[in-house]
Amino acid sequence: MRSALDTIADFVRGHHVLTLATSRDGIPYATPLFYAYDDARNCFVFASSEETEHTAQMKANPSVAAGIALETDTVGKIRGLQCRGRIVIGDAADARCYFARFPYAKVMRPTLWRLEPSWMKLTDNRLGFGKKLIWEATPPS
């Protein structure tokens, strides 16, 4: 039997835009971003300018939420992911992952960030109306 994470990863690999939700001092902000998913590390990698509001907010408060949705008018095909996690600055593995998916972005020399999910919930009506699959990171011991 497939794990919830396997099914979630399949969904995530089929998309390329997530909506990142950040907050600072009680002020929320949401922005859509292109992302690459790193299967090996179960994380999302995205590029963002240092001058953006969401970058300022995630530097001040690295706890974030994100969503990915399949746009459809057919109720039986509704699928979407909600997640919570933490933002960290990208590393060399993140660069390989991101630029493999978006090679044209390399010339812009963007700052890369990694969203490390701690909790994800996939709603997939194809598996049954309102069917939810939940994955949660194992807390470090």
Image (cartoon, rainbow, N blue to C red):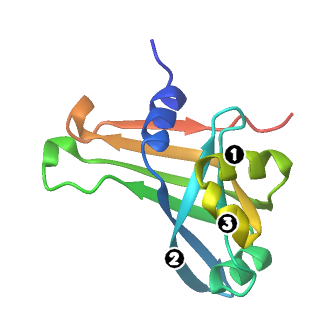
Q: Is residue 87 placed above or below 32 in the rendered structure?
A: above
Instruction: Tell me what residue is drawn at x 35 percent, y 43 percent.
Output: 123
Instruction: Check the image and name the residue furthest to the top.
Output: 1
CA gap, disc 3 to disc 1?
A: 12 Å
Image coordinates of residue 32 in percent, x first then y, are 49, 70
CA gap, disc 3 to disc 2?
A: 15 Å
Nearer mark to the viewer, of 3 and 2: 3
Quadrant of residue 58 in the image? bottom right
Report the residue marked by disc 1. 97
Q: Is residue 141 placed above or below 92 in the rendered structure?
A: above
Image coordinates of residue 14 in percent, x first then y, are 42, 42
Q: Earlier in the sequence, mark 2 or mark 1?
A: 2
Q: Is residue 88 placed above or below 111 in the rendered structure?
A: above
Which kind of residue does numbered mark 1 sit on? Cys
Q: Mark 3: give few (<14), some (14-19) or many (20+) Cα within 10 Å.
A: many
Report the residue marked by disc 3. 47
Residues 76 and 118: in front is: 76
Instruction: Tell me what residue is drawn at x 85 percent, y 49 percent.
Output: 92
Nearer mark to the viewer, of 2 and 1: 1
The answer to whether any part of residue 116 appears in the image is no
Position of the N terminus, as image quadrant, is: top left
Instruction: Tell me what residue is drawn at x 54 percent, y 53 percent.
Output: 83
Q: Which mark is residue 3?
A: none
Quadrant of residue 103 in the image? bottom right
Which kind of residue does numbered mark 2 sit on? Ala
Instruction: Check the image and name the residue furthest to the left.
Output: 74
Residues 43 and 49: in front is: 49
Image coordinates of residue 138 in percent, x first then y, are 72, 34
Which kind of residue does numbered mark 3 sit on? Ala
